[in-house]
């Protein structure tokens, strides 16, 4: 694994260096969702801090209605599209909860 330090690519060789770099990159990626429509109210309250997978499945299957108040137009159009689609019977939604259960 390599890391950019002052414009120079430096090879990381120790376990600690590699883990620290992975952690730093992952933290940056997690922050990308901040201030996006699904991370703002009223969707934030619905989905929770970790974007609850059970709720996501309900959204994708059309079982949950997103609030029409305060929702950004692009998100509303996405939701209408997703919920208007019939799920193909050969496709299933699968995920693991925090406790490792399905």
Image: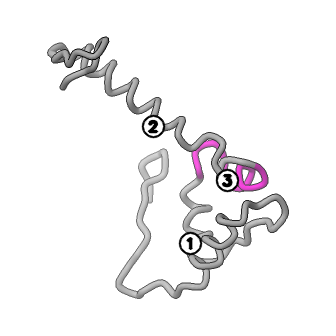
Which residue bears the numbered disc 2?
Answer: 29
Q: Which residues are magenta?
A: 41-51
Question: Which residue is rendered at x = 81% and y = 68% of the image?
Answer: 68
Asked if residue 28 lies in the magenta stretch, the reply is no
On screen, residue 19 above or below 94: above
Q: Nearer the viewer, residue 98 or 64?
A: 64
Q: Foreground mark, 3 or 1?
A: 3
Q: CA distance from mark 3 to mark 1?
A: 16 Å
Question: Which residue is rendered at x = 60% and y = 85% of the image?
Answer: 84
Q: CA distance from mark 3 to mark 2?
A: 17 Å
Q: How many marks?
A: 3
User: How far across and down, in percent of the image, does residue 88 sit?
Assistant: 42, 86
User: How far across and down, in percent of the image, does residue 46 sit?
Assistant: 72, 56
Which residue bears the numbered disc 3?
Answer: 37
User: How far across and down, in percent of the image, does residue 67 sit?
Assistant: 79, 65
Q: Are marks 3 and 1 in contact (CB under 8 Å)?
A: no
Q: Residues within 10 Å of mark 1 (few under 14, many from 20)?
A: some
Q: Quadrant of residue 38?
A: bottom right
Q: Work out whether mark 3 precedes mark 1 in sequence or the reverse, and give the earlier one.
A: 3
Q: Foreground mark, 2 or 1?
A: 2
Question: Which residue is rendered at x = 59% and y = 50% of the image?
Answer: 51
Which residue bears the numbered disc 1?
Answer: 60
Q: Is residue 55 left or right of residue 5?
A: right
């Amino acid at each position: 694994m390599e890391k950019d330090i002052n414009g120079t690519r430096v090879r990381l060789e120790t376990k600690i260096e590699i883990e620290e770099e992975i952690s730093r990159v992952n933290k940056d990626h997690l922050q990308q969702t901040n201030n996006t429509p699904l991370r703002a109210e009223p969707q934030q309250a619905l989905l929770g801090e970790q974007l609850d997978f059970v709720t996501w499945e309900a959204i994708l299957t059309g079982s949950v209605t997103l609030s029409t108040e305060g929702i950004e137009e692009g998100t509303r159009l996405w939701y209408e599209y997703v919920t208007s689609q019939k799920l193909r019977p050969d496709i299933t939604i699968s995920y693991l909860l925090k406790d490792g259960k399905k």
